[in-house]
Amino acid sequence: MQDGAPSHISTKVKQLLNLHFGKERIISRHFPTAWPSRSHDLNHCIFWLWGYLKDVVYGGPIANLTELKNSITQHIHNITTETLRFVVEHADLPFQLIGENGGQHIEHFLSKSKPTSIS
């Protein structure tokens, strides 16, 4: 989803997902469990990884698209096991914060808990 636009899903994709996972395990507006709009808060990988990459990749000037792709690739390869472990161990934090804050945006809370280095 981007900018709150609903996701689009074909009938064949819905049938394939249902066959492999069952309707109750799929989160989508096309199944019983709807994915909340604008819910990037609930996807820790997106919230942490893309925020982290944005911080490190755009820390300096980027000359061209090739340099951008190489920088992203290099920074992904430099993420340590310890950093990934920290992210996974704290994956439930967004859900706790959402509950404690009545469903409000929580970005300002999460930025304090994100690992900022890959050392």
Image (spheres, grey):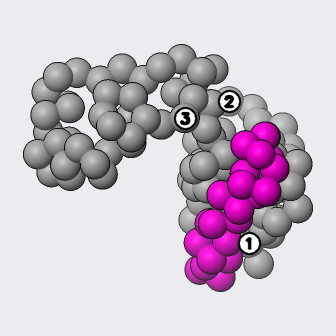
| Element marked by disc 3 | loop
Q: Residue at x 30, y 51 (%)?
A: 25
Residue depth check, mark 2 versus mark 3: number of the one nearer the observer: 3
Identify which amino acid the numbered label 3 is placed on: Pro
Q: Residue furthest bottom?
A: 82
Q: Relative to residue 84, is residue 51 depicted above or below?
A: above
Which quadrant of the structure image shows residue 26? Answer: top left
From the viewer's perspective, is 51 left or right of 2?
right
Q: Is the residue marked by circle 2 packed among few (<14), some (14-19), or many (20+) residues within 10 Å?
A: few
Residue under pointer 3: 36
Residue under pointer 2: 64
Magenta highlight: main SS: helix
Q: Which residues are magenta?
A: 81-106
Comes first in the chain, label 2 or label 3: 3
| Residue 29 appears in the figure | yes
Real-space CA distance between mark 2 and mark 3, rounded to the nearest whole angstrom: 36 Å
Identify which amino acid the numbered label 1 is placed on: Ile
Q: Residue at x 15, y 51 (%)?
A: 20
Residue under pointer 1: 118
Task: Assess whether residue 100 is covered by the magenta stretch.
Answer: yes
The image shows residue 107 at horizontal and vertical percentages of 81, 46
